């Protein structure tokens, strides 16, 4: 993995973590528990972890009754695996109502993420503005509405999740930019290949497939 990819893998950005003086952030470190507060590392200090967003579907999202009530969904929380032990969490509560089946841009909900390492880190919360799912893969995007990462508010980010049923995978739009703050004019529902792996035993994600009418 080249240096650019390693930096991107640090979530909200290794660059900010380094600025904050986190020495362990430059490794391939990280782990993710999409607890209600999620956000890759970088920050000016230890920020309190925000409360977990409501998962209206939660584990029940897989129930057929719930699936029939909406066109698509991405829910759940988990930590990402990081050999260096960084605590990286992601949490999703994104839904596309059945009545809006033909328009993924009408998806609603929130997602959060956080990244902490060596006592430093940051978190962010985004409001969903697009959700597209296909089989067990989901791409969700949203604009950051709250964060302790300077410059993050107002930025659009996109995340891709693969609900494998065993060890889910995840990817994020800032994988190629280093951190969300450096992302400019990202289109809606744009993520990256799900190259990250969820840390076993920390939770998982649930994707409700979208069935557009062509």
Image (cartoon, rainbow, N blue to C red):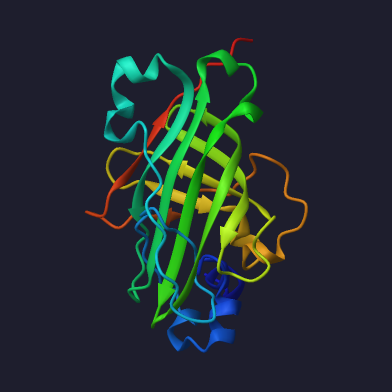
Residue pushed farthest left?
201
Q: Visible in this render: residue 103? A: yes
Task: Out of 191 and 58, give the one closest to the viewer.
Answer: 58
Q: Between residues 24 and 120, which one lies in front from this camera angle?
A: 120
- Residue 54 is drawn in which quadrant? top left
Residue 94, image x, y percentages: 49, 36
Q: Looking at the image, which residue is at 71% across and 60% down? A: 183
Q: Quadrant of the C terminus?
A: top right
Judge left or right: residue 58 versus residue 91.
Answer: left
Instruction: Kindly identify the residue that appears in the image at 46 percent across and 43 percent down.
Output: 161
Residue 19 x, y percent position in the rendering:
59, 85
**Where does residue 121 sit, x and y in percent of width and height?**
47, 74
Residue at the extreme top of the image, as rendered: 214
Picture quarter containing residue 60? top left
In the image, is residue 140 above or below residue 91? above
Q: In the image, is residue 87 above or below residue 44?
A: above
Residue at screen point 44% across, 44% down: 92
Residue 29 in view, yes or no? no
What residue appears at the point 39 percent right and 53 percent down from the top-left corner?
36
């Amino acid at each position: 993995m080249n240096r650019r990819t390693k930096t991107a893998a640090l979530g909200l950005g290794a660059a900010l973590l380094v600025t904050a003086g986190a020495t362990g952030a430059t490794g391939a470190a990280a782990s993710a528990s999409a607890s209600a507060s999620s956000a890759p590392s970088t920050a000016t200090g230890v920020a309190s972890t925000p409360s977990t967003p409501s998962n209206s579907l939660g584990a029940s999202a897989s129930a057929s009754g719930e699936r029939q009530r909406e066109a698509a969904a991405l829910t759940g929380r988990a930590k990402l695996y990081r050999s260096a032990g960084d605590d990286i969490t992601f949490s999703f509560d994104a839904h596309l109502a059945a009545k809006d089946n033909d328009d993924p841009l009408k998806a609603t909900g929130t997602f959060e993420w956080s990244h902490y390492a060596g006592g430093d880190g940051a978190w962010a919360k985004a409001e969903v503005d697009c959700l597209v799912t296909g089989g067990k893969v989901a791409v969700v995007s949203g604009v950051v509405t709250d964060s302790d990462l300077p410059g993050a508010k107002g930025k659009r980010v996109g995340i891709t999740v693969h609900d494998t049923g065993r060890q889910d995978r995840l990817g994020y739009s800032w994988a190629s930019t280093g951190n969300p703050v450096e992302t400019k004019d990202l289109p809606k529902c744009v993520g990256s290949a799900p190259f990250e792996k969820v840390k076993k035993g920390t939770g998982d994600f649930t994707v409700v497939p979208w069935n557009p009418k062509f």
